[in-house]
């Protein structure tokens, strides 16, 4: 981490940062590395309205905005960019538009590492559109200027094609704070939080999956 100049995190929805990368984000911040989180949508077309429901389709936009702002506060993240695209429509943006947005962010921030989703291994169309835009933007850069890509993949149907993750971050010591980050997104994470709290085999396995290690794949454009 001592060699990092700036880390750019790019995901399409509030809470995408919470599950797989918030421990890593906090480790960077605590090490003095500037981190920017660019969240493309407010996730307000998501199915969940809380457990039990407490939001409405009309109120979910503001609720999820408040949730991601609280998540950023818990992580100590001071540069949160809410880009305001319509949820579940990123794949329909004009060709090259999101790539141009990513290029502008990279030009402004000059990151040494970008964290995002892995194209074709991240299930949701918004995830895939985001991943494609990030990779395309970096591909268009001069090779010697390209930041590293640390990408999250979780499509269980095809994940074995990628093999084992080659970047594994031990987030020991961040378990409580990561759980708080996840709890900040309470409209989405209620059932998962119950599993984390359960004194059962399933609860232990869930804690092991989310609160011990965060795993990424490097992406070699060459």
Image (spheres, rainbow, N blue to C red):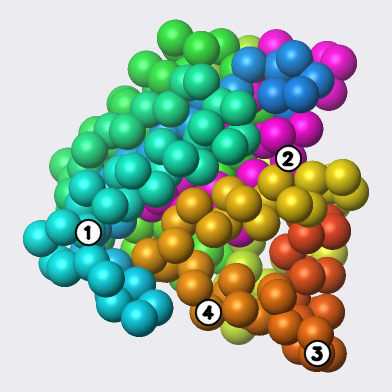
In the image, the segment drawn in magenta is: 1-27
Disc 1 to disc 3: CB gap under 8 Å: no
Q: Position of residue 123 (x, y in %)?
A: 47, 70
Q: Position of residue 179 (x, y in %)?
A: 66, 56
Residue displayed at 49% across by 68% down: 189
Q: Kindly indicate whether the residue at mark 2 contacts the one at mark 4 (C-beta within 8 angstroms).
A: no
Element type at mark 3:
loop
Q: Secondary structure at mark 4?
A: helix
- List x then y, in percent, for residue 219: 68, 44
The residue where tag 3 is placed is 200
CA gap, disc 2 and disc 1: 27 Å
Residue at screen point 80% across, 20% down: 31
Q: For numbered disc 2, what is the local secondary structure?
A: helix
Which of the two discs, 1 and 3, labels the residue nearer the N terminus?
Answer: 1
Circle 4 Cα neighbour tier, 10 Å, few/some/many (<14 / 14–19 / ≥20): few
Of 82 and 54, the residue lying toward us: 54
């Amino acid at each position: 981490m001592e060699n990092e100049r700036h880390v750019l995190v790019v995901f399409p929805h509030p809470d995408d940062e919470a599950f797989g990368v918030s421990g890593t984000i906090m480790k960077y911040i605590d090490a003095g590395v500037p981190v920017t989180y660019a969240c493309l949508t407010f996730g307000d077309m998501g199915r969940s309205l809380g457990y039990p429901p407490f939001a409405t389709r009309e109120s979910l936009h503001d609720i999820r905005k408040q949730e991601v702002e609280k998540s950023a506060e818990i992580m100590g993240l001071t540069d949160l960019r809410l880009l305001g695209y319509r949820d579940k429509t990123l794949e329909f943006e004009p060709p090259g538009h999101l790539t141009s947005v990513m290029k502008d962010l990279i030009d402004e921030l000059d990151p040494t590492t970008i964290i995002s989703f892995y194209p074709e291994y991240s299930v949701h169309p918004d995830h895939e559109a985001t991943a494609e835009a990030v990779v395309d933007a970096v591909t268009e850069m001069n090779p010697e200027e390209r930041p590293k890509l640390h990408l999250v993949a979780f499509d269980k149907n095809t994940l074995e094609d990628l093999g084992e993750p080659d970047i594994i971050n031990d987030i020991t010591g961040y378990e409580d704070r990561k759980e708080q980050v996840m709890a900040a997104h309470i409209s989405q994470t209620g059932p998962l939080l119950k599993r984390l709290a359960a004194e059962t085999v399933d609860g232990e396995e869930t804690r092991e999956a989310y609160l011990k290690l965060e795993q990424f794949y490097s992406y070699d454009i060459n």
